[in-house]
C-alpha cells in the first residue's frame, strides 16, 4: 500500500513541504482482528438483553465470529500489505501483513476457535458468567491476532496487553474458588512486572533512536551516539527480558503451573497456545526485526535461556506423581515450559547468523514447531476436559491415575490422547512431532550451536519418560472399574477432539504443510 497523495487543498504545515496527515486504512488487511473486536462488543451488548436461558447462544456466536475471522485471512494470502504508515519522511508502517503475520494469526485464531468449542461445555458445567467469559476470550484473541502484524514498539506493547489483561480475568473467573483466585493473582503480578520492565526498555530504545517503528529502530541502533550507547543496550536488554516473561521462559516460568491448575481447563489450553504464540511473536519481532545489530548479545542469551527452559520444564514434568491432585494439568503445564525451550532454539540460532535470509529461515523453524505444538497440545487439553464427563462420577481432581482404563471406557478419547502424546514426544506415528524436533535440531546445528543440540537431545529423552508413562496408564486396568456404561461425551468436546486429531493426522501424513516454513522467507 502506498502513502496517500496530498490533496490540492492541503495547507503547508511546515516550511519546506506539505504532507497529508490523513491516512487511508486498508480494511481488508485489518479485517481479522477487527471482526473479533466487533464480535466482542456484540457479545457484551447482547449479554445485557438476553435472558439466562438464552445466554447459551453467546458461545456459538463467538465461535462463528472466530471462524469468520479465519476466513478473512484468505484474501490476504499471496502478497504483502501495509497500513497505518507514516506520510512524512522515510516510509514506515505500524501494521504489516506478510507470511509471518498470517501464520501466527492462523495459529491464534484457530486456537481461539478450538478454545471456544472446548468452553461451551465448561461454561455451563462450572457456572461461569457467559457474557463475561465470551467477551474476555474474544478481546484477548483480538489482541493476540493484532500482535504479529504490529511493526512499532507502541503497537506491540498495546497488543500484548490487550491479549494479556482479559486473560487475568479468565483465569480468576471461577467465583468462590481459592485456587482460581490465587492463580489469577500470580498471573497478574508476574505479567505486570514483565510489562513494567518492557515499557522501561521501550522508553530507553525510543530515547536512543527517536523512533518507535521497528524498521527505523533497526537502522538507527548501530549508529547511536556513543553517549547513548549504554542507554540503548539497556533498553534492548530490558525489552527482551519483558518478552521472556510472556513466553514463560525459565527463570520467568514460576507462574505457569499454578495458573494452569487454577484456571478452567479451556483457559489453561488457551494460555498454553495463544499466550505463548503472542509472547513468541513479539520476541521474534523485536529481536530479529528491531534489534538485529545486537544479535551478538541476544543470540547467546537466548541459547542459554533455551537450554535452561527446556531442562527446567522437562524435569518439572518428570516429578509429577500419578496420585497428585491436578496432576494431568500440572504435567501439561510443565510440558509447555519445556516446549517453550524448544521454540527458543531456532531464535537463538537466528542470533548466530549474519545473513537476514538465514535468520528468517530460523524464524520459520519456530513458526513450524509452534503450529505443530498448537494442534496437539490443544487436543491433549481437550481430552483432559473430556475426562470430567466420564460415567463413573470419579473425583474431579484431575489425577493421572484417573486415566487408567480410559482405553476401555472411552476408546476414542484414549486413542486421540495417545496420538497427541506421541506427537509431543516426537515418536512415530506422531511424525509431525518428530519432524518438527528434527527441524529445530537442525537449526541449532547449522548455527554452530552443537552444545545446545546436545542439551535438546537429552531433554527429548527425559520427556519420553513422562509422556510414555501417561500413555501407558491409558491401557492399564482401572483402579475402580466403571459400573455400567460410560456416558457419551458432549458434542462440543467430541468435535474438538476429532478436529484436533484429524489435523494432527493430516500434518503427520503431510508434514510439509507446516515444515515448509523452515525454508521460507517470512518477512
Image (cartoon, rainbow, N blue to C red):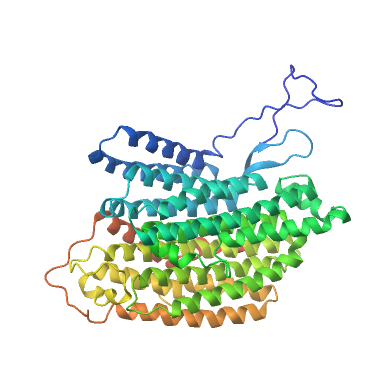
Q: Is residue 523 visible?
A: no
Q: Indicate whether 247 appears above or below 345.
A: above
- Apparent side of residue 79 relative to residue 509 in the rendered image (left or right): right
Q: Quadrant of residue 388?
A: bottom left
Residue 383: % across, % down: 32, 65
Q: From the image, which quarter does the N terminus lie in?
A: top right
Residue 60: % across, % down: 32, 44
Q: Quadrant of residue 375?
A: bottom left
The residue nearer to you, when weighing 313 against 258, is: 258
Q: Residue at x 65, y 81 (%)?
A: 451
Q: Quadrant of residue 506?
A: bottom left
Residue 488: % across, % down: 19, 61
- Apparent side of residue 420 relative to residue 522 in the rendered image (left or right): left
Q: Is residue 511 visible?
A: yes
The residue nearer to you, when weighing 27 against 385, is: 385
Residue 181: % across, % down: 40, 57
- Apparent side of residue 93 relative to residue 43 in the rendered image (left or right): right
Q: Residue at x 47, y 39 (%)?
A: 37
Toward the left, the furthest residue is 484
Q: Indicate whether 418 appears above or below 170.
A: below
- Apparent side of residue 294 relative to residue 141 in the rendered image (left or right): right
Amino acid at each position: 500500500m502506498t502513502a496517500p497523495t496530498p490533496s490540492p487543498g492541503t495547507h503547508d504545515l511546515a516550511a519546506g513541504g506539505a504532507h497529508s496527515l490523513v491516512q487511508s486504512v486498508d480494511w481488508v488487511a485489518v479485517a481479522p482482528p477487527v471482526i473479533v473486536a466487533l464480535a466482542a462488543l456484540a457479545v457484551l451488548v447482547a449479554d445485557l438483553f438476553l435472558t439466562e436461558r438464552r445466554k447459551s447462544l453467546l458461545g456459538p456466536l463467538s465461535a462463528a465470529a472466530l471462524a469468520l475471522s479465519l476466513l478473512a485471512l484468505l484474501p490476504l494470502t499471496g502478497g504483502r500489505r501495509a497500513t497505518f504508515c507514516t506520510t512524512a519522511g522515510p516510509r514506515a508502517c505500524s501494521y504489516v501483513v506478510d507470511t509471518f503475520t498470517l501464520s501466527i494469526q492462523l495459529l491464534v485464531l484457530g486456537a481461539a476457535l478450538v478454545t471456544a468449542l472446548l468452553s461451551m461445555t465448561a461454561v455451563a458445567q462450572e457456572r461461569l458468567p457467559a457474557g463475561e467469559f465470551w467477551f474476555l476470550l474474544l478481546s484477548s484473541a483480538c489482541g493476540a491476532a493484532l500482535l504479529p502484524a504490529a511493526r512499532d514498539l507502541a503497537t506491540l506493547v498495546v497488543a500484548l496487553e490487550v491479549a494479556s489483561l482479559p486473560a487475568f480475568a479468565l483465569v480468576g473467573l471461577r467465583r468462590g474458588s481459592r485456587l482460581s483466585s490465587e492463580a489469577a493473582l500470580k498471573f497478574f503480578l508476574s505479567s505486570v512486572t514483565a510489562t513494567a520492565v518492557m515499557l522501561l526498555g521501550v522508553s530507553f530504545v525510543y530515547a536512543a533512536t527517536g523512533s518507535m517503528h521497528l524498521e527505523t529502530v533497526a537502522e538507527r541502533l548501530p549508529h547511536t551516539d556513543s553517549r547513548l550507547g549504554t542507554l540503548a543496550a539497556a533498553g534492548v536488554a530490558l525489552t527482551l527480558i519483558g518478552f521472556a516473561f510472556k513466553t514463560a521462559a525459565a527463570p520467568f516460568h514460576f507462574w505457569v503451573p499454578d495458573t494452569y491448575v487454577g484456571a478452567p481447563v479451556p483457559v489453561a489450553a488457551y494460555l498454553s497456545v495463544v499466550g505463548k504464540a503472542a509472547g513468541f511473536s513479539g520476541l521474534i519481532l523485536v529481536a530479529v526485526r528491531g534489534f538485529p545489530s545486537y544479535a551478538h548479545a541476544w543470540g547467546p542469551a537466548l541459547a542459554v535461556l533455551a537450554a535452561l527452559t527446556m531442562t527446567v520444564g522437562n524435569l518439572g514434568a518428570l516429578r509429577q506423581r500419578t496420585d497428585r491432585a491436578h496432576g494431568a494439568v500440572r504435567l501439561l503445564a510443565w510440558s509447555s515450559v519445556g516446549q517453550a525451550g524448544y521454540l527458543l532454539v531456532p531464535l537463538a540460532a537466528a542470533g548466530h547468523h549474519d545473513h537476514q535470509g538465514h535468520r528468517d529461515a530460523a524464524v520459520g523453524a519456530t513458526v513450524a514447531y509452534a503450529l505443530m505444538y498448537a494442534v496437539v497440545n490443544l487436543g491433549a487439553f481437550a481430552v483432559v476436559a473430556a475426562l470430567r464427563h466420564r460415567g463413573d462420577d470419579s473425583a474431579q481432581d484431575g489425577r493421572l491415575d484417573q486415566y487408567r482404563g480410559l482405553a476401555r471406557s472411552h476408546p476414542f478419547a484414549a486413542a486421540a490422547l495417545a496420538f497427541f502424546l506421541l506427537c509431543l514426544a516426537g515418536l512415530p506415528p506422531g511424525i509431525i512431532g518428530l519432524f518438527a524436533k528434527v527441524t529445530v535440531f537442525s537449526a541449532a546445528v547449522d548455527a554452530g550451536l552443537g552444545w545446545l543440540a546436545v542439551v535438546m537431545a537429552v531433554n527429548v529423552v527425559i520427556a519420553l519418560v513422562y509422556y510414555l508413562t501417561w500413555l501407558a496408564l491409558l491401557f492399564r486396568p482401572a483402579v475402580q472399574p466403571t459400573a455400567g456404561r460410560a456416558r457419551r461425551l458432549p458434542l462440543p468436546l467430541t468435535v474438538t477432539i476429532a478436529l484436533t486429531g484429524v489435523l494432527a493426522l493430516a500434518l503427520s501424513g503431510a508434514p510439509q504443510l507446516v515444515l515448509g516454513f523452515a525454508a521460507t522467507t517470512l518477512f
